[in-house]
Image: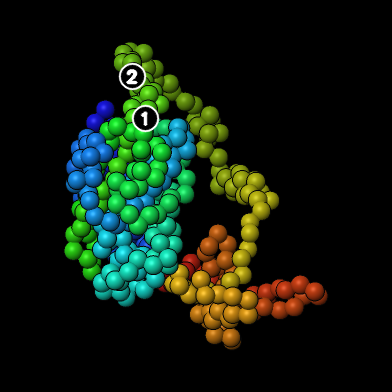
């Protein structure tokens, strides 16, 4: 049973690191978890201080919760980095804006964690939106009925490190009953097929006449006809073309300030050609024109594969 708990917490730790790194634009590393079985009183003694308590509800394959506890400094510093990427230290207070930013961070983590845990257990796994409390774990357990009713928990202790922050403790908590139900629900992968040895004498070497070999390897003209027919198969596949006027990165605080009448300046000069994209890849440049009552785009340049590689 503890192996399942360790696998679960390992996937969660890996997901935290892989999810936070692109969000914070810096490498985040999370240590291998140390897993202990504790009761409510033990948890209250070992983790007595307030911090960011993130509670995620598991809705499939059964109902339960997973708790992630971030110490005070880390809970304030993570959302501050999203709001202000140049922040050097945690702010003094944990505001409503920090709570909203931390909630978005945790939603990203839980979505990725659901996929990783499901793949590890060979089981569909769904985690709903996270709730964030500035509290102690003990107080949070009193608020959440599933935690209040549980007797024992698996607690995982991690060390999380990233540039600009000294290593701090992070704790994940799940009820023991949660792991017990996972064991019952987990689907064992099908056994690998047994390979049968085939005696050499069963293989026969056939001599193919030259005429038959020529039929198997058609002349270049026949290959060209087949290629043309294969190309015709994909000609009617619909593709969406996107014309991008421009883009801009904005902090969460700036987005929250947007109101009717606000002007968002894009990172593109007025006389710069727009990008024409297919599947997110720029294939051409052009200028926006009016076609009757609709907008259109006049192609001014096709982007070569070499130019696309230079832009990457």
Q: Position of residue 237 (x, y in %)?
A: 65, 51
Q: Are marks 1 and 2 in contact (CB under 8 Å)?
A: no
Q: Position of residue 101 (x, y in %)?
A: 41, 63
Nearer to the camera, 187 or 75: 75
In the drawing, does residue 94 fall left or right of residue 170? right
The residue sitting at 81% across, 75% down in the picture is 292
Nearer to the camera, 100 or 124: 100
Q: CA distance from mark 1 to mark 2?
A: 32 Å
Please tell me whether mark 1 sits on a helix, a strand or a loop. Answer: helix
Q: Quadrant of the N terminus?
A: top left
Please tell me whether mark 2 sits on a helix, a strand or a loop. Answer: loop
In the drawing, does residue 170 fall left or right of residue 289? left
The residue sitting at 53% across, 34% down in the picture is 216
Q: Quadrant of the C terminus?
A: bottom left
Q: Which residue is mark 2?
A: 195
Is residue 130 visible to the viewer in this orientation of the structure? yes
């Amino acid at each position: 049973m503890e192996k399942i708990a360790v696998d679960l917490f390992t996937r969660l730790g890996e997901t935290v690191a892989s999810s936070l790194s692109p969000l914070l634009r810096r490498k985040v590393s999370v240590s291998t978890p140390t897993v202990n079985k504790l009761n409510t009183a033990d948890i209250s003694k070992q983790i007595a201080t307030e911090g960011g308590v993130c509670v995620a509800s598991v809705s499939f394959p059964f109902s339960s919760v997973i708790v992630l506890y971030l110490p005070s400094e880390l809970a304030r510093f993570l959302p501050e980095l999203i709001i202000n990427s140049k922040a050097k230290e945690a702010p003094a207070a944990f505001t409503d804006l920090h709570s909203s930013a931390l909630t978005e961070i945790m939603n990203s983590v839980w979505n990725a964690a659901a996929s990783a845990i499901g793949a590890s257990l060979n089981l569909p796994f769904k985690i709903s939106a996270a709730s964030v409390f500035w509290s102690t774990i003990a107080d949070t357990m009193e608020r959440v009925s599933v935690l209040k009713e549980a007797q024992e928990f698996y607690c995982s202790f991690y060390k999380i490190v990233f540039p600009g922050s000294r290593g701090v403790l992070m704790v994940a908590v799940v009820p023991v009953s949660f792991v017990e139900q996972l064991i019952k629900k987990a689907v064992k992968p099908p056994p690998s097929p047994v390979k049968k040895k085939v005696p050499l004498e069963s293989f026969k070497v056939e001599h193919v006449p030259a005429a038959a070999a020529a039929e198997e390897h058609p002349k270049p003209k026949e290959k060209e006809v087949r290629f043309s027919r294969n190309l015709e198969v994909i000609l009617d596949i619909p593709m969406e073309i996107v014309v991008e006027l421009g883009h801009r990165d904005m902090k969460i605080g700036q987005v929250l300030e947007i109101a009717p009448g606000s002007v968002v300046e894009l990172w593109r000069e007025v006389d710069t050609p727009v990008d024409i994209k297919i599947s997110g890849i720029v294939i051409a440049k052009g200028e926006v024109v009016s076609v009757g009552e609709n907008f259109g785009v006049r192609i001014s340049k096709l982007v070569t594969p070499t130019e696309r590689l230079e832009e990457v």
